[in-house]
Image: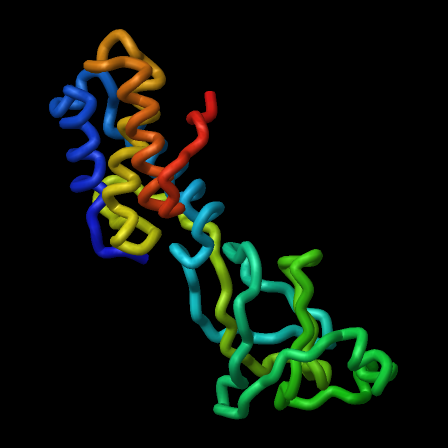
Amino acid sequence: MGTVSITSVIGRASVLLNDSENIHWSQTELVDWLNDGQREIALYRPSACVVNKDVVLVVGAKQTLPGDARSLVDIPRNTNGYSIRQVDRRALDAIAPEWHLQAKAKARVEHFCYAETDPKTFYVQPPSPGGNSVEVIYYANPPAVGIGGFIAVDDVYASALVDYIAFRGMSKDTDYTPGGANAATAHYNAFLSAVKGQENQPAPRA
């Protein structure tokens, strides 16, 4: 979660849109575009929205990431302090094919297995008896924010969000804003440059 206010970001974008009084584009519409921009940033830069939290495990080896998660980064330790190592599931299956059995359950997790092909699921070994917790680091979907709050991505992306909002506004009404379509493209390219750090950018999506 960032510390830059939503009011600050949409205020700067409103100046670029030549609409500082929010007559042509409402604050509600600008905030909607800001939320769209945050989600696009998370697609290009998952590290822009990382969560580190303790997660209570359910009974069994199979576990699910929190609802706001996109994918897992790491499970470094049990919350009581014992470390956890990532292992390959196929290797574990070959060594101990019975490791999923609930009879093997223990409160202290020793290993976890994870595959990007199933990004919301991970497995713990030994299986959990339920109720024990581990520290989980994951890439999150940025939550929707509103007036009075703060951006949900890192502060370094605040200027990129200003450019994204300007791009959306200018794309919606090219006749109202100075420069029209060319200005919209320039702001989208500035957004991508800030997020991806690339000089050659594709044309903005319609």
Q: Considering only vertical position in the picture, is 177 above or below 33?
A: above
Residue 87 locus on image (x, y percent): 69, 79
> Which sits in the foreground, 166 or 21?
166
User: Which residue lies at the image location 68% right of the left edge and 78% below the top edge?
Assistant: 124
Q: Considering only vertical position in the picture, is 97 above or below 138?
A: below
Q: How is the image coloured?
A: rainbow
User: Which residue lies at the image location 30% right of the left edge and 12% below the top edge?
Assistant: 174
For the N terminus, the quadrant is bottom left
How many numbered marks does the figure carry?
0
What is the quadrant of residue 16 in the picture? top left
Report the residue that reaches farthest toward the front.
200
Q: Considering only vertical position in the picture, is 119 above or below 84?
A: above
Residue 149 locus on image (x, y percent): 25, 48
Q: Is residue 107 left or right of residue 202?
A: right
Q: Considering only vertical position in the picture, is 197 above or below 205?
A: below
User: Which residue lies at the image location 44% right of the left edge and 41% below the top edge?
Assistant: 40
Q: Is residue 80 left or right of residue 155?
A: right
Q: Is residue 194 left or right of residue 141?
A: left
Residue 46 locus on image (x, y percent): 46, 54
Report the residue that reaches farthest toward the top.
175
> Which sits in the foreground, 50 or 189?
189
What is the quadrant of residue 164 in the picture? top left
User: Which residue lies at the image location 43% right of the left edge and 64% below the top edge?
Assistant: 51
Residue 107 locus on image (x, y percent): 64, 89
